[in-house]
Amino acid sequence: MILTMENICKSYYRGKTEVPVLHNICLSVDKGDYLAIMGPSGSGKSTLMNLIGCLDKPSSGTYRLEGQDVAARKDNALAELRNKYIGFIFQSFYLMPSMSALENVALPLMYAGVPKKERMDRARAALEGVGLEDRMKFLPNQLSGGQCQRVAIARAMAGRPALLLADEPTGALDTASGEQIMDLFDRINAEGSTIIMITHEPSIAERANTVYHIRDGRLSVPEEDLL
Amino acid sequence: MLGNIQQAFQGVWHHKLRSFLTMLGIIIGIAAIITIVSTIKGTNDQIKENLVGSGTNVVEVNIHQGDYQLDLSWQQPEGISVISEDTRRDLETLEGVEAVSLYRQRQWSSQVLYKDNAFSGATLGVDENYFRVYGYRLCYGRSFLPEDRTNHRKVVMLDTRAVAALFPGENPVDKVLEISGEPFTVVGVVEKSSQFRPVMESIDDYNMYADQTSGAVFLTEAGWEIAFSYDEPQNAAVKAKSTDAMTAAGKAVADALTASQIRDPKNSEYSYQSEDLLQQAEQLQTMSESTNKLLIWIAGISLLVGGIGVMNIMLVSVSERTHEIGLKKALGAKRRRILGQFLTEAAVLTSLGGLLGILGGIGLAELLSRAMDTPTAISVPAIIVAAAFSILIGVIFGLLPATKAARMNPIDALRRE
C-alpha cells in the first residue's frame, strides 16, 4: 500500500462554529493504481486533495503515506514528506515565471538536496520523458498551455515520487491539449506510476482505472466495485 | 545561498524604480554618515597637523610663575639661571627630543621702529639652532654668522610679516632700524617653510593665530643684551622626533630645566612648563567631534526610516509572491529556505543602498571640501562599518516579512488569487 486513510474527518472553524467538510473517509491506494476522485464544487474534493498531498492535516483519523504517520508531523516535516513522496500537478501549472523549463523541473530536487549536476541531469531526463527535449531553456511564457502542463508533469515526476497528485490537470487547457495530457497520464501509469486525479469532468475521470465520487464530504464506493 | 543572492538581484533589477525608492532612505542615511565622518576626520587631521606640529613638531617650554607664563618685559625673575650650551646639549639626549633651541622673547614689543613705521609683533633673541628647529628658510640677504655673535654686531633679521609692517614696498636688507633706541642693521629675511593654517573654532584661536602671525624680529643673543637685558633666562623650543612624541618630549625638557635652572625648585614659585599643544588639539578635536556626533544620530534616524521603508516593501513583496511561496512550500521548501530567500533579498536591497550611499557620501564629502574649503579625509573603517551596518539593517527589518513568508500555509498561499 502506498497510502491508507482510515476514518479521516476534517472540519474548519468559521469563527467559533465548526464546519465539517469531510466525514469518515476511508481510502487505500496501491502501487500502480490510477484513481479519479470526482465531485462537484463544494463537495470537499479540494480538501481531500490537500490531505492526500500532505498540505493539510486531518482533524481526526489516521493517514499513513508509505508507512509514515502524516497527522503527527509538523510544518517542516510535512514539507519533507511532500518533497519525497508526492508530485503535484496543478490546474494552472504554477511554474516559476522567471525560471526556464529545466530550472522549474529541477526545483523540487534542489529542496531534496540533490547536487546541482545530478539534478540538472534528472530534470533533463524528465523533460525528455514528456517530449520537451527541445524546450528546456524556454521560459513558461514562451510555452503553450499544454507544454506548460507537461513541464509541470516533468517537475512532479523528477523526484520519482510514490504518488502523482493531479488537481484538474486539464482544467485550463483546450480539448486537444487536454487529450494529449491525458494520453501522457495513461503512458506514465502504464510505466508504473501511481496517479490520483481530482476532477469534475466525467470524460477525464473515465480514463482512470478506478473512479471515486465525493459528495457532501463522503466518499462513495468505487464504480468498478458496483459493476 | 548564491542562488538566493542572484535571484534577489534579479528581483531588485526587475523592480528598478521601486527598489531605488526603497533604498533611498538607506542611501541618504549612509551618505550622510560617510560625509560627516569624513569631515570629522579631515578636520581632526588638519588640527593635529597644523596646530600641533605646525608641520615642525615643536613644543615651546616657557618659564611660568604659578600657572601663568611669565612676561619678562615687566619683571626679571629671581633665582633662574641662564641655560648653558652644555645643558642644551644634554637636553637633546632626552627621549623623543630631536633638537633644542634657546631663545628670549618679547611678545608685545612696540620698540621696533623704522622711520615712521612701528612694529607690534614679537622680538626674539635666538641661538644658532632656532631657524633650523622652527623650519625657517632664508628668503634673501644672509643669516646670522658666528662673527655676529662673537663681535656683538648690531644686526637683525626679519620675517616676511615684519618686513611687510616696517618696510612696505622697500628692500629691508642693509636698512637700519631702531630697537629700544639702538640702531640695528637688517641682514636677512626669513619665512616659515611650512604653511601655518589652523582651523578656527573660537575667537581665542583667532587671537592666538593673529599673535603668532603678526611677524617677528630676530636678534642674536649678543644683540638681545644690547637691546634688552643681560643674563635673562631663556625659553626652550623643543623639536620632537614625531608629533606623537611632542607631549612627552616637552614635559621631559620642562622637568629637566626646572630641576637644573631654578634655585630651590620645590619651593620656588617659578617653573618651566611645556605648552601642551597636543592636548589643546585633542580638546579642539573633541569639540568638533561632539558637534558632528549629534549629526550622526540624526543621520541614524534616516537609516531607521529607511529600514522601515524596506520592511514595508518587503511585506508588499511577500504578499505579491504568495503564490510563489505557496508553490515552493508545496514542492517541499522548508521554512528556513523561504526565510533565507526573503532575508537575502532584504539584505541585498539594503547593502546595495549602502553601497550607493557610500559612493554618494564620498562624492558629497569631496564636493563639500571643494565648495567650503574644509578638509575631508575618507575613513576606511567608517566605510566598512557602513557596509556591514546596511546589511544588518536589511536582516533586521527583513526579519518580520521573511518570517511571515516562511510561516505561510501552503494551501492558503496557493488558493489566493
Image (spheres, coloured by chain):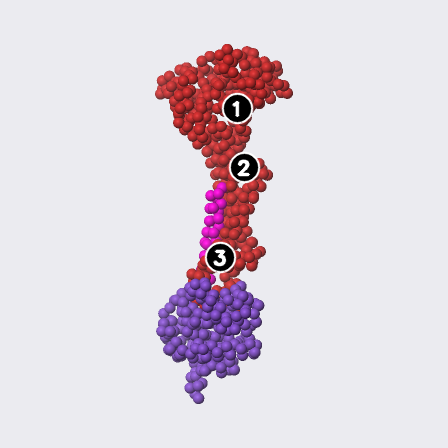
Chain A visual colour: purple
Q: To which residue does mark 1 refer?
A: B136
The label shown at residue B375 is 2
What distance separates the C-alpha of mark 1 from that of mark 3?
Answer: 60 Å
Residue at x 49% of width, y 82% of height: A207
* Crowd band around label 2 with a 10 angstrom C-alpha radius: few (<14), some (14–19), many (20+): many
Q: To which residue does mark 3 refer?
A: B5
Locate the N terminus of chain B by quadrant: bottom left
Task: Kindly identify the amino acid type of the residue bearing the numbered disc 1.
Answer: Tyr
Q: Position of residue B2 (x, y in %)?
A: 47, 57
Residue B113 position (above or below residue A223): above
Closest to the camera, between mark 2 and mark 1, is: 1
- Tag 1, which chain? B
Magenta segment, prevailing SS (helix, strand or loop): helix
Residues shaded magenta: B379-405
Letter of the chain shown red in the rendering: B
In this view of the protein, which residue sits in the foreground, A174 or B105?
A174
**Same subunit: marks 2 and 1:** yes
Residue at x 50% of width, y 67% of height: A102
Residue B143 position (above or below residue B290): above
Task: Residue B334: tell me if it is visible.
Answer: no
Task: Kindly identify the amino acid type of the residue bearing the numbered disc 2.
Answer: Pro
Asked if labels 1 and 2 touch by Cβ distance under 8 angstroms, the answer is no
Residue at x 42% of width, y 17% of height: B85
In the shown orientation, is residue B271 left or right of residue B32? left
In this view of the protein, which residue sits in the foreground, A16 or A135?
A135
Which of pointers 2 and 3 lies earlier in the amino acid sequence? 3
Residue B302 position (above or below residue A141): above
Residue B405 position (above or below residue B24): below
